[in-house]
Amino acid sequence: MKKLIRLVILLISVATLFSGAMQAIAPSFVLNFIGAQIDPTTKQLFATIGMFMFLFGAMMIHAMYNEENNRVVVIWSGLQKLGASAAVFIGISQDVFVPLAAGVAVFDLLSALLFFYYLKTLKSDAIG
């Protein structure tokens, strides 16, 4: 089971890296998908958010291939996913994003839960 969770976490991290890169390079595409206003300010903000998504995805991938379990990276990556989910849900509730963006929020929420579950497996390995 732990190998499956690691694989899923790795796939989420790769998806985060690639979607972050896409958001950084082509923020208008992402803004259009979630139904947000597209102007120079929102494009810059989404490109900046994309850069951080790219970095968090890369950091998590790096940590998974590290010889030691890096719990700190898993905690902060899980918190990033949780925060991203909340931010998108708030954006939907304030009519900044279309309801379709809830798919992104749910993905990030489920990702956060998986990250925290994975963290629990790392702690149990350290104890056992």
Image (tube, rainbow, N blue to C red):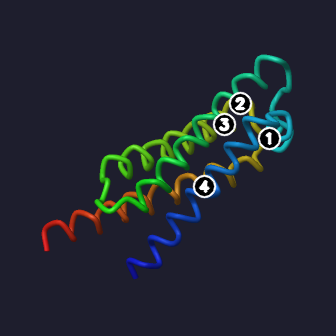
- At horizontal 53% and vertical 69% (from top left) the residue drawn is 8
Q: CA distance from mark 2 to mark 1?
A: 8 Å
Res. 50 mark: 3
Residue 45 x/y as whole percent: 69, 24
- What separation in Å lies between label 3 and label 2 (alpha carbons)? 6 Å
User: Residue 127 is drawn in which quadrant?
Assistant: bottom left
Q: Is residue 122 left or right of residue 99?
A: left
Q: Would you say 45 lies left or right of 4 here?
A: right
Give the labeled residue for mark 2: 46
Number of the front mark, 1 or 3: 3
Other residues around mark 4 within 10 Å, as few (<14) / some (14–19) / many (≥20)? some
Q: Amino acid at mark 3?
A: Gly
Q: Earlier in the sequence, mark 1 or mark 3?
A: 1
- Closer to viewer: mark 4 or mark 3: 3
Quadrant location of the C terminus? bottom left
Contact between marks 3 and 2 (CB within 8 A): the answer is yes
Regarding mark 2 in the picture, which secondary structure is present there?
Answer: helix
Q: Are marks 2 and 1 in contact (CB under 8 Å)?
A: yes
Count residues near mark 2 (Cα–Cα under 10 Å), then give few for <14, some for 14-19, many for 20+: many
Say left or right for 101 vs 52.
Answer: right
> For numbered disc 1, what is the local secondary structure?
helix
Q: Which amino acid type is marked by label 4? A: Val
The Cα–Cα distance between marks 1 and 3, rounded to whole angstroms, is: 10 Å
